Amino acid sequence: MAIAHASRQVAIAMRRQGRHASATDLLTHTAQHLNADTGHPSAAVLSAYTKLLCTALQDLASRARV
């Protein structure tokens, strides 16, 4: 979970620097490695997975508006 949290924070900083594609790649790559879509993930894994993907989607949506 610490890696997911750190990746999200790094991606947010990357977005603020205009590195949107790299930030989205980091977020989605980290989310995929949580394996939340297999087996019975814990609530903590699902929470981290959701936060990562929501942050990626927020970035994509903000870029679409510009």
Image (cartoon, rainbow, N blue to C red):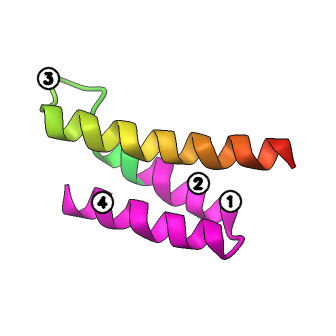
The residue drawn where x is 26% and y is 63% is 3
Q: Quick one: label 1 or label 4, which is nearer the N terminus?
A: 4
State the residue position of label 2: 24
Q: Say what amino acid the circle numbered 1 marks.
A: Ala
How far is disc 3 from disc 2 in space, using C-alphas?
26 Å
x, y percentage for residue 10?
45, 71
Q: Which residue is mark 3?
A: 40
Q: Are marks 2 and 1 in contact (CB under 8 Å)?
A: yes
The residue at 58%/54% (across/down) is 24
Residue that badge 4 annotates = 5
The kind of secondary structure the magenta stretch mainly shows is: helix
**Disc 2 versus disc 4: distance between alpha carbons?**
14 Å
Where residue 60 sits, quadrant-wise, is: top right
Mark pair 1, 4: CA separation = 19 Å
Q: Are marks 2 and 4 in contact (CB under 8 Å)?
A: no
Q: Is residue 46 left or right of residue 51?
A: left
- Count neighbours of disc 2 (C-alpha within 10 A) and say few if under 14, some if 14 to 19, many if 20 or more: many
Q: Position of residue 37 (x, y in %)?
A: 31, 27
- Residue interval drawn in magenta: 1-29
Question: Tag 2's secondary structure?
Answer: helix
Q: Is residue 8 magenta?
A: yes
